[in-house]
Image: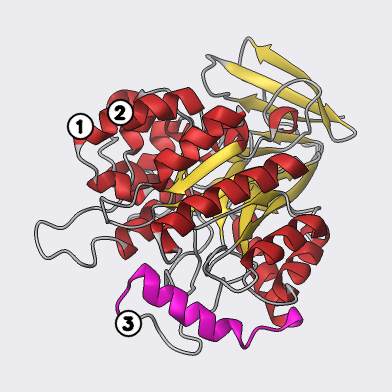
Amino acid sequence: MHSIINARLRRCSGLFTIQWLDGQISAITPQPDRLAAQADDRVLDAQGHLVIAPFVEPHIHLDAALTAGEPRWNQSGTLFEGIECWAERKAMVTHEDTKRRAHETIRMLAMHGIQHVRTHVDVTEPGLATLKAMLEVRDECRSTLDLQIVAFPQEGIESFANGRALMTEAVELGVDAVGGIPHFENTREQGVSSVHFLMDLAERHGRLVDVHCDETDDPSSRFLEVLAEVTRVKGMGARVTASHTTAMGSYDNAYCSKLFRVLRQAGLNFISCPTESIHLQGRFDTYPKRRGLTRVPELDRAGLNVCFAQDSIVDPWYPLGNGNIVRILDAGLHICHMLGYEDLQRALDFVTDHSAKAMALDERYGIALGRPANMLLLSADSDHELLRTQGHAVVSIRHGRVIMRRPVAEAVLV
């Protein structure tokens, strides 16, 4: 039996002891008082800090990670030049290169307490060599984190040669989710057709859906309404995610009043990538310059599930990143004007519970009896304090085994 003592749990008062056996949580017990530290390597003293379920990264591109500047840099900083750069780099990709960069990036994520990841993998590639490499990575990293793979048609489904056949083959190879990029298709008609195709494909094979949707400042890009309506009709809301939806930041309020009615009826999930979007969007503006994010607070207040993600780490679309999801949360709350008292008390929802819901993790996630002993000890005692101090996960436990420790350095004024 192993345990954590003197732990704080989110939305609970007082201190707790959490115990686990054979990789499963066996007891969660309130403590009347703080317990004395024990010289026992089976007992971890949380010292009054938060213990939470692991961080979740619901949207990243591991296949493109660590390729920035190869063969050239994205000089304009736009989404579309990034796609051009990646098309050139993709011609240089090998099986070993893909796996090496993916595993290196996974280590970064794990060092920051992330144990659940959804990665989009480009399948606009005859032979699907990159996808096959990433399917191997999914199996090889299981001791570190759970990896979901989305079949992502980076250069389109209808606009790319044999796009439909490649998507279908990717699903048959065993991806977890079906993706799309309707705003990148050559015409609106092709974009609409691609949404119907990918939703039918996912429904037929029992897969999740995660669509790059309206990732542009163009207010006339309105594929979200199509995705939402197809989701509503099929009753697939819990299994469908709309990523980015940055055009929503440019929609007028009259249109959004109608759109939100359909979104609530559909009940789909949303993922915002704040650092990526603040970097890529607004590139065609002079001043005033748009933030280029979706309407995160409005979606949240409407009762829709919305979460934050990193999207890229040192690739043609974003030249920075180190796997720290708390950095993304901090930036997102700032950019979205969500630093009010109530938002700060529940801030971690956007990188934990909400993301787990979008990934349909269900009973595999959360600190509760009988669930996997996957948890983090944080460097602070509350959501607000973790953000204020720019804190970290200091211990990551997976299936009852410590997989990461981070020494907490303390500055001394001399």
Asked if 32 appears above or below 203 in the picture, the reply is above
Chief secondary structure of the magenta portion: helix
Q: Residues within 10 Å of mark 1 (few under 14, many from 20)?
A: few
Residue 87 falls inside the magenta stretch: yes
Question: CB under 8 Å between callouts 1 and 2?
Answer: yes
Question: CB under 8 Å between callouts 1 and 3?
Answer: no
Magenta residue span = 75-96
Residue 106: x and y, percent? Answer: 66, 62
Residue positioned most to the top: 32
Q: CA distance from mark 1 to mark 3?
A: 36 Å
Answer yes or no: is residue 287 visible.
yes
Give SS at disc 1.
Answer: helix
Q: Identify the mark at residue 75; answer none if there is no mark.
A: 3
Q: Residue at image x 35%, y 38%?
A: 296
When asked about the image quadrant of residue 294, the answer is top left
Q: Identify the mark at residue 21; answer none if there is no mark.
A: none
**Count of marks placed on residues:** 3
* Foreground residue among 35 and 275: 275
* Foreground residue among 228 and 1: 228
- Which amino acid type is marked by label 2? Lys
Q: CA distance from mark 2 to mark 3?
A: 38 Å
